[in-house]
């Protein structure tokens, strides 16, 4: 369905067209008409499906720009998502002259207070900072007409339920409420019953909720082996645009520095960086000036980044839900993606928990040896040379080439060119990554799937270098890269189904809303 068919005002349609969108995504097509009718809606959709516009356009449509009061409130789990949502709502509402203010922790509260005094039409923020402003009486919610809870399941996982309920208690009962969540655990359904009026539950069809387009692999390795193995994989696979996930801020910083030392264009992003620095890194990554983004889970949550071909989980996440969010950065818009997860021997239990959640087995991968990684670099170098030769434009350089050919053989000159592009792995800079405390060992029950307790808790770079390390099992390490040496990853993965919630058992079930599935 085209946006023109959704009965939006000309100002909003102009903003949508300016953003380059014509066709509505499934969640937008299903949600926007219901929200425009004033109904409460629960939208089940993952990050990257266009849910900001799904709730943003109806909210913006309803706002009276001439009325200088707060009319819309959006609660988000992280400041990155709050900032991204604020920016998108501003772009969509610019022609209607709608003002949007973001409030979140880790930023100057005085500046936010001044922004709130300017009487924005919409406030987007994280629960903690929102409550802070409410307690300071710098944010009053008695005029809010539309309330949005974005990534509700993530806010519950982060322990924000009590804060959310306090915020909702300050919002008028006569309002429209829109809730978006990737999963639908009982706690989310309880919010629907407790705080919403006969909400309609919009579910995108199952294939939109699975990781079927992502080839998922794991590499079993000791912690000190992982960096050299990963750089050999990067050399061999030559991914176009990559995200590497680390468990801690220190890990992210060390990985980013190590990758830079090995000749990769990489930068890290985590919560200790200034907002200006984080936005600068993201802009560089989205524009292709960076090949590798190294990130923590929190820093990457809610970021809408397209074109990612590979995700490397340097550390397996403690929470299996985080794994789904991580690999969801690739395999978007109908394109294939590759994920590789490094698992230490004592962390295999976490891998099995993840497989149960995703209903999809990860394939074991044997990483390339140093010799094989170098062979991959040679293949990439030859491919680069052939591409440049096809582009031609060499006339100005031919006299200098003739001069060199008088002194050296063509074979020596060609070998020097290949050496310059491929680099010798023996020249790789030594990199030491500080070991992290291992995750608590997971005990598996009988039958291979027993109960578990606790909180399961680039553009093609041709100038790359690899390090040392031992072989692992399964000749599966290619993972979809483009090289002429024929090492291809096994894509015969088991096909998985829809995500399952790992919400606490025993919560009250309810049927206080209509299930509406979108099968278009």
Image: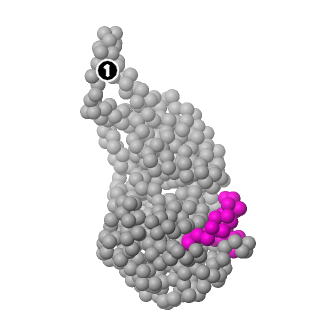
Name the residue furthest front.
66
223 lies left or right of 512: right
Residue at 54%, 48% in the rendered image: 281
User: As displayed, is residue 266 above or below residue 194?
Assistant: above
Q: Is residue 477 magenta?
A: no
Other-residue count near label 1 (Cα within 10 Å), few / some / many at <14 / 14–19 / ≥20: few
Residue 116: image quadrant is: bottom right
The image shows residue 140 at horizontal and vertical percentages of 66, 77
Instruction: Give the labeled residue for mark 1.
Output: 397
The answer to whether one can see residue 276 in this image is yes
Considering every residue shown, the one lying at the far right of the view is: 136
- Indicate the secondary structure of the residue bearing disc 1: helix
Residue located at (55% from left, 32% from top)? 429
Q: Residue at x 52, y 32 (%)?
A: 428
Q: Quadrant of residue 370?
A: top left
| 458 up-or-down from 317: above or below | above
Residue 9 in percent (x, y) is at 39, 74
* Residue 51 showing in the rendered view: no
Quadrant of image for the N terminus = bottom left
**Given the current orientation, which residue lies at the most extreme top position?**
407
- Point out the stretch of residues depicted in magenta: 106-134
Which residue is painted at 56% across and 61% down in the image? 83
Q: Is residue 315 left or right of residue 14?
A: right
Left/right of residue 229 with respect to residue 483 in the rendered view: right
Q: Position of residue 496 (x, y in %)?
A: 39, 67
133 magenta-colored: yes
């Amino acid at each position: 369905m085209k946006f023109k068919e959704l009965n939006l005002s000309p100002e909003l349609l102009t903003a949508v067209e300016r953003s380059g969108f014509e066709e509505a995504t499934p969640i937008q097509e299903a949600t926007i008409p219901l929200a425009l009718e004033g109904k409460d809606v629960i939208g089940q959709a993952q990050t990257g499906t266009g849910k900001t516009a799904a709730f943003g356009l109806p909210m913006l449509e309803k706002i009276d720009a001439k009325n200088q009061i707060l009319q819309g409130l959006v609660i988000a789990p992280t400041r990155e998502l709050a900032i991204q949502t604020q920016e998108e709502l501003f772009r969509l509402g610019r022609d209607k002259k709608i003002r949007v203010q973001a409030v979140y922790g880790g930023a100057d509260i005085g500046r936010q207070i001044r922004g709130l005094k300017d009487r924005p039409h919409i406030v987007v923020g994280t629960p903690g900072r929102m409550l802070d402003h409410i307690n300071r009486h710098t944010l009053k919610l008695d005029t809010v007409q539309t309330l949005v809870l974005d990534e509700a399941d993530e806010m519950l996982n982060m322990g924000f339920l009590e804060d959310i309920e306090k915020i909702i208690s300050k919002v008028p009962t006569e309002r429209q409420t829109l809730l978006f969540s990737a999963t639908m655990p009982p706690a989310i359904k309880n919010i629907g019953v407790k705080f919403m009026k006969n909400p309609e539950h919009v579910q995108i069809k199952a294939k939109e909720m699975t990781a079927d387009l992502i080839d998922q692999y794991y590499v079993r390795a000791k912690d000190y082996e992982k960096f050299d193995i990963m750089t050999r994989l990067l050399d061999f696979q030559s991914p176009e645009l990559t995200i590497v996930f680390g468990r801690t801020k220190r890990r992210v910083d060390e990985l980013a520095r190590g990758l830079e030392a090995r000749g990769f264009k990489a930068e890290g992003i985590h919560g200790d960086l200034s907002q200006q620095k984080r936005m600068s890194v993201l802009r560089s990554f989205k524009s292709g000036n960076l090949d590798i983004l190294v990130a923590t889970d929190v820093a990457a949550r809610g970021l809408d980044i397209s074109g990612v071909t590979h995700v490397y989980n340097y550390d397996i996440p403690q929470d299996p839900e985080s794994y789904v969010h991580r690999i969801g950065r690739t395999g978007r818009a109908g394109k294939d993606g590759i994920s590789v997860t490094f698992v230490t021997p004592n962390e295999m239990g976490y891998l099995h928990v993840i497989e149960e959640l995703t209903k999809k087995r990860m394939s074991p991968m044997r990483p390339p040896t140093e010799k094989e990684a170098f062979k991959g670099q040679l293949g990439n170098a030859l491919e680069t040379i052939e591409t440049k030769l096809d582009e031609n434009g060499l006339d100005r350089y031919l006299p200098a080439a003739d001069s060199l050919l008088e002194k050296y053989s063509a074979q020596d000159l060609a070998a020097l060119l290949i050496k310059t592009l491929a680099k010798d792995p023996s020249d790789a800079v030594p990199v030491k990554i500080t070991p992290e405390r291992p995750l608590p060992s997971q005990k598996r029950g009988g039958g291979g799937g027993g109960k578990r307790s606790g909180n399961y808790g680039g553009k093609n770079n041709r100038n790359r270098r690899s390090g040392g390390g031992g072989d692992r099992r399964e000749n599966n390490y290619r993972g979809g890269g483009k090289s002429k040496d024929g090492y291809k990853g096994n894509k015969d993965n088991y096909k998985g189904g829809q995500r399952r919630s790992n919400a606490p058992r025993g919560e009250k079930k309810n049927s206080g809303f209509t299930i509406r599935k979108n099968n278009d």
